[in-house]
Amino acid sequence: MKRLAPALWLLLAAALAYPAGPWADQYVLHVLVLVLVYMVLAMGLGVTPGFCGLLDLGFVGFYGIGAYTAGLLTLAYDLSFWVVAPLACVCGAFFGVLRGAPVLRLTGDYFAIVTFGFSELVVMVLTNEIWLTRGPLGLPGIAPVSLDFGWLSAFFRPGTPLCYEFSGEAPYFYLALAMAASVAAVLRRAKASRLGRAWLAIREDELAAASAGVDVGRCKTLAFAVSAGIGALAGAFLARWSQFLSPDMFKFWESFLVLCMVVLGGLGGIAGACAGAATLIGLGEALRALLPGLGIPVEARFLAYGLIMILIMRFRPGGLFAASARQPDCPAG
């Protein structure tokens, strides 16, 4: 990773400069924001299968919970994004613990089946509880993100606009980049902490970890809460970015796609989750533009996903960043 540091810094500088230049394209910026959102989702999901070794097929449920929490609070109470985002994280973490607490002793396929059922239950609630979510009609008219500088009014002339409302893709790009960087920094520190080492011990051998004094139930519960909270944060961002929500946006396919990103990058690796998200989303958008010109249906891009996963499993079974998946990103203190 140290050899890659100069290239990563150069890539970050180019990303920061691109939206501000006259060459910036709104479609490209939209795709970049989407990539960053999926990076957050992949990092969040990676906590459960990557750190603890538990296959989670219902992660998209927390994505939907966070999105609808932010959307409903915005429409009902006109709350700022900076208020609804933390509330969505707390709500997602609460449901993560609520889902995980009864199934702490389940592992393998049994745990995966429970998580899949939870995801489908969330979609059913969002679809059928019309009095709350408007069901298939969705939630239109969600306010965009804004910055209120009214508390600085004493330093400006009367009549100066002190509220900046996000428009276009550039401000959302910077906000999504800050969100992804913050999540990566938090998970990097968590992975190198005592809790992170406990998670990795549970992934390798749960019985041996318990014999060594690890509180397996407590550590798993914290993993569920952290993973769900990160997914809900991405959902809150989606609600204020797209300004429209529908239950169809949170179907099982989304969980499967995010899981493919985690596996592609390397289980347990933060950089790998980001690389997997960038690869699959970037490839999907490239094929979406390329295939119609070749007379091939757009849906055929899903075949490319399957082919990539087969090749990765054949030639790099540990993922693109297998080394970072096997050991902590930071030296253990």
Image: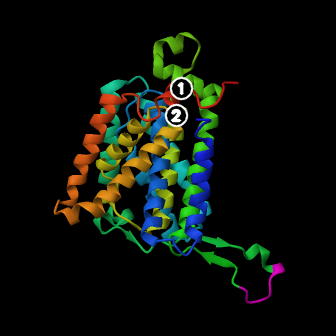
- Cα distance between the residues tagged 1 and 2: 8 Å
Name the foreground residue: 130 vs 299.
299
Please tell me which residue is depicted at 51% across the width and 60% down the height of the picture. 237
Please tell me which residue is depicted at 49% across the width and 21% down the height of the picture. 202
Q: Amino acid at mark 2?
A: Ala
* Left or right of residue 146: residue 168: left
Please tell me which residue is depicted at 46% across the width and 72% down the height of the picture. 26
Q: Secondary structure at mark 1?
A: helix
Where does residue 330 sit, x and y in percent of width and height? 64, 30
Quadrant position of the N terminus in the picture: top right
Whether residue 169 is visible: yes
Give the magenta part as a residue range. 154-160
Residue 223 disc label: 2
Q: From what the image shows, is residue 64 above or below residue 98?
A: below
Q: Secondary structure at mark 2?
A: helix
Task: Using the rendered view, name the quadrant where residue 150 is placed.
Answer: bottom right
Spot the residue most to the bottom.
Answer: 159
